[in-house]
Amino acid sequence: MEKIMIIEDDLKIAVYLGGYITKYGYQVVIAEEFEKLMDIFRKEQPDLILLDINLPSYDGYYWCRQIRKESICPVIFISARTGEMDQVMALENGGDDFITKPFHPDIVMAKIRSQLRRAYGAYASKHEERVLIQDGLQLFPERLELWFGSNVATLTKKETDIIESLMDRFPRVAGREDLLVKLWDDQAYVDENTLNVNITRVRKKLQELGIENAVETVRGAGYRLKVTWNKGQA
């Protein structure tokens, strides 16, 4: 059963939409804590998102950009804004489609089905899934999953990018500057501490899979992947 996440600050509209979508056999999650949207997104892992533009604190464009850092799930904007530039902005910020308010629920359902077919169903791209393998470690970039033996870890988009870079460069060093460019090429300046935080998260994910000291720091250069079995790991 596909899961649809609704991000809409008008609760009446969200509940109305949710009830209508549920009748067609979809699971619905209505986000109400807007300051915790990414936490809700990571927990629920929806198959598609309906996203309003006018939201508290940050607008829908901002949240779509944050989602795109971690997922390629379809995002349909639903907004009372009718200007052409609003629709352009929605697409430029990572959206897949745009519906203007007031809307007919059948139109919403048709667009939901269409986007789900394109992303996962009959119209989905049939390209062969990528997998990177190194010493028993298997990375599935499109799934955001890392496998080691029988264990599986779910990754964020940035964790996936870091591990992919480390595996691509193995046994060479992945330079800090190269990692910064790959992960944050849309930003003029990023505090290197942000990279350190993400490297720490990657090390933790690898440790959870039973791989100790998996990412070696090469002083003045960057990081290198080291894959060794933890004692007793099956």
Image: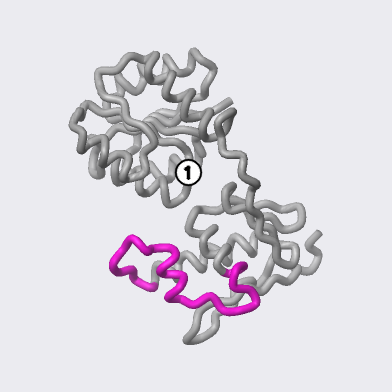
Q: Horizontally, is 61 left or right of 154 in the view?
A: left
Residue under label 1: 72
Rendered position, 4 above or below 140: above
Which quarter of the figure has residue 106? top left
Q: Horizontally, is 232 left or right of 208 in the view?
A: right
Instruction: Please state the horizontal and vertical placement of residue 186, each as a whole percent of the image.
Output: 33, 60
Q: Which residue lies furthest to the bottom in this view?
A: 220
Rendered position, 108 above or below 144: above
Q: Horizontally, is 68 left or right of 138 in the view?
A: left
Q: Is residue 229 visible?
A: yes
170 vs 159, nearest the viewer: 170
Which quarter of the figure has residue 74? top left
In the image, what residue type sits under mark 1?
Answer: Ile
Magenta span includes 114? no
Instruction: Please state the horizontal and vertical placement of residue 15, each as a whole percent of the image.
Output: 36, 19
Instruction: Please state the horizontal and vertical placement of residue 127, each as a whole percent of the image.
Output: 61, 44
31 vs 172, nearest the viewer: 172
Span of residues in magenta: 166-192
Q: Horizontally, is 52 left or right of 50 in the view?
A: left
Image quarter hosting the C terminus: bottom right
Rendered position, 40 above or below 108: below
